[in-house]
Amino acid sequence: MKTCIPRLLPLAIATALALASTTANAVAATPAARAENAFLSQADAAARAARVSDVDYQLDFTLTGKETFNGTTTLTFDLKDADSPLTVDLDKATIKSLSVNGKAVAPQYNGWFITLPAQALAKGRNTVVVAYERLHSTNGEGLHRMVDPVDGRVYTYSHFEPAAAHQMFAVFDQPDLKATYQVTVSVPADWQVISTTRETNVAPAGDLRRWTFARTRKLSPYNFSMHAGPYTMWEDKSGKYPMRLFARQSVAAQIKPAEWFKYTKAGLAFFDDYFGIPYQFEKYDQVLVPDFLYGAMENAAAITFAERGFMYKADMTAEQRARLAYVIMHEMAHQWFGDLVTMQWWNGLWLNESFASFMGTLATAESTEFKDAWRAFYSEGKQNAYNQDQRTTTHPIEVPVPSTRNAFDNIDAITYSKGASTLMQLRHLLGADVFRKGVHNYLVKYQYRNAKLDDFIKSLGQAAGRDLTGWTREWLYEPGVNTIAANYTCKGGKIAGFTLTQTAQSKALPTLREQRVQVAAFRLDGNAYKLERNVAVTYKGAQTAVPAMNGAACPDLVYPNYGDWGFVKVQLDPRSFDSARTHLAAVDDPLLRAMLWQSLWDGVRDAKLPLNDFLATALNNAPQEKDYTLLGDVLGKVAASKRYLDLMDPQAPYAQAVTRQLEDMAWTATEANKGDDNFQRRWFGAYVAVASSRPALDRLAALLDGKEKVDGLTINQDLRWSIIGRLNRYGYPGAAALVEAEQARDKSDSGQAAALSAVVSRPDPAVKTEWLNTVHDLQTKLPFSKVRTAMEHLYPAEQRLLSEQTAAARLAGLPQLDKAAGPVYMRAYGPTLIPGGCTADRVKRLQAAADAGKDLSAGTRRALLDTLQEDQRCVAIRQAMTAH
């Protein structure tokens, strides 16, 4: 995880351009082999897979650094029959020649796939050779090209998930047609080339150098990759497998290769042992790349990482190192679960990502210094999954995917984090050793093959000696999150009866599930909670008695998912809820403390606890928090609270008063944490995130020009951009000049992105109009990474009045934009530029758009409905606030 003429073009234009590339003397069209559109349906993929087998690609590329590249694909495969045409995927290329089984064939090509006529094919072995030219991509898919703004050097990398390999070469672009790949590529003399295998030869080829690579083992097309450019390389041979790391020359100084190699080496040792199968791809390369669409991607033996997530102009904080370790582990888990054994079709993508999320967290916790990785997972990924699962747009973990257009429709927190939580729950249910045995058996049986969900569940069930059909139905095919509550009575100071009550999410989502959890009871003893009893219980149905709790001291606090075994929402009983509000600091266990914070935040989001009450608790307790990971969680909730206030009315007296309190809290803590770099930087980040009063903005400006200092804190380049972004966002006098001056200091790509985000966030109607027009211009020459940056920063929460000036037009134009732009664009546009407003009138407007927008693509309609529900939530939170 995680085009040359971008798929942002209206369909008619893309088709016209594609048709223009075919030869003028093309033979008469053969019957349509499949639907004439840019996406492959599951039915058509299955039909092709039933005929094709034993696939091999010989790929030859010439890359000069210019906007186009040349390629030749020699595709060899067995064909079950030659009774009908066969299609080969190739996106928006200019075909120079096509031969089938040694004979030239006039290409029948629609810009998305080539149709090979039946009469040119043979039963048995076939060879197809396609020579073509294509523009590099600029939106992060296919073979992406980027020109470094610092030194003008050109960098390329491939990205094929979910189905974009055909944007680089002619291919059967579906996961169940695994193949071998043998690559040769000619590139400028100072370039590196990285692929699935190591190069076997590099030789001069005129002004270029020609790289030859060993043939790969069998891989699905989306797991193969090739990256080329004048990358800086670091190498480490201290482990069992040779490791390399690559990055652009202009950012090389920001990379700490020792950190990367430390976690990579630890992860490879952990997974070799856990899976009981050695790493299969011989070498381990990792490449930091610009403009990346996602966080990282598990290409076999040549993993790509988004620069923006892993490059810093100062030493990494503990949080940043922990994230690096986790993402390395996540992508590494895919080398077994995803690359070695691969889903048959895109409906199985969730299992790849869920398993990698689960194993990535497990490996981080057990093989690195970040032993609290599961707590970080609880606070980040798992909460996102709970939120997603409570939306009207929730969906089962396992969902149908009718075509490649829909492959990423359901790639969200349910796919990653609910799925991972479900696997963790299954591990608790079956036992850790049984779960591990089932995983090992599955990987051994299906290595270098494709598998389905049933294959995985059957393997676990066989290891456990248990039928998991019912569990699978409840957890994987039914959406929604349940709630559990502890109901108990006390007599004589002892628990006399204890029951767990499980409720369904709604009448529309009535499923009750089987789950194993720990139920814990605590007594307040002075200034600390003492654990009185902890019982593991498997519950199912609406009521489950827990007789093992009887006889324990009548508790001050009960938590019925202690240790976070279950994926379930906890409703605290009234006494426990009051304890959580009033004695948070008395809870020693940081995970339990995090869960109690979450219960309070759930109360806010469910409009049961007034937001101002939560903020009072935060102001009293956050400065006392000594756990670094939990502090980040709490400050994230504070920032979310501030966002709600900004959406309501940033000028309201309470909003202004509490903002000043939050500013004072964060500033005081920043100064108080001198000597602890991690805590100080975390608190200062919180200060920048809430600073909006004029005195706070004045202080930021003074820190920027050196008139004020924080003892122990260095205002590094990343912090300078954060401050400049904040000053621009609030229209601080002279902020525009600060951007220009900083761009002169920092000419890097990340500096350009920071400058762009600062500019577009200015509260200036002219700026908003200019950049909204740029975003809506599907023919813009700007790289998509910059368009996406503009989307993300155009309308901050407090600029609701500026957003309102174009809100109606954005909603009215949504259907047309959705049809023209394509899924990559709309995945960014929908969550950022569908307008809310946190008023009853704005909710009605969104509801009207939703009622009228039944024909929107699945992803865009989901974004619209999510915005509507979040707006309804904001209104409810507003109404629940107590008067001041």
Image (cartoon, grey):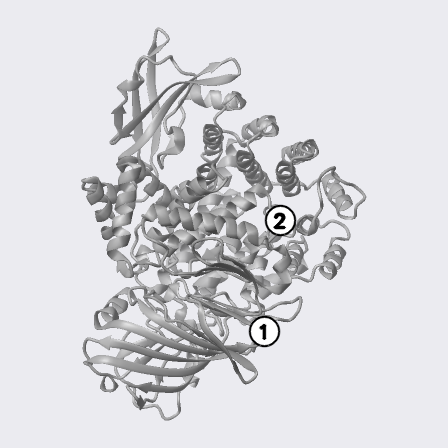
Along the viewing direction, whichever of 342 and 613 lies nearer the viewer = 342
Is label 2 in a helix, a strand or a loop? helix
Left or right of 850 in this view: 646: right
Q: As displayed, is residue 689 above or below residue 231?
A: above
Q: Residue at x 37, y 82 (%)?
A: 130
Quadrant where the C terminus sits is: top right
Q: Is residue 125 left or right of residue 800?
A: left
Q: With respect to residue 849, does 709 lie above or below?
A: above
Instruction: Report x, y in % for residue 581.
Output: 51, 23
Q: Which residue is mark 1?
A: 190
Residue at x 43%, y 40% (from the top left corner): 366
Where does residue 403 sit, x and y in percent of width and height? 32, 64
Closer to us: 751 or 807: 751
Q: Nearer the viewer, residue 750 or 231?
A: 231
Residue extending farthest to the top is 492
Query: What is the CA distance from the residue labelled 2 to the residue labelled 1?
Result: 48 Å
- Is 201 left, or right, of 33 in this rendering? right
Which residue reaches farthest bottom? 25
The amino acid pointed to by label 2 is Gln
**Disc 1 residue type (three-letter):** Asp
Q: Nearer the viewer, residue 851 or 825?
A: 825
Q: Which residue is mark 2?
A: 799
Label 1 neighbourhood size at 10 Å, few (<14), some (14-19), many (20+)? few
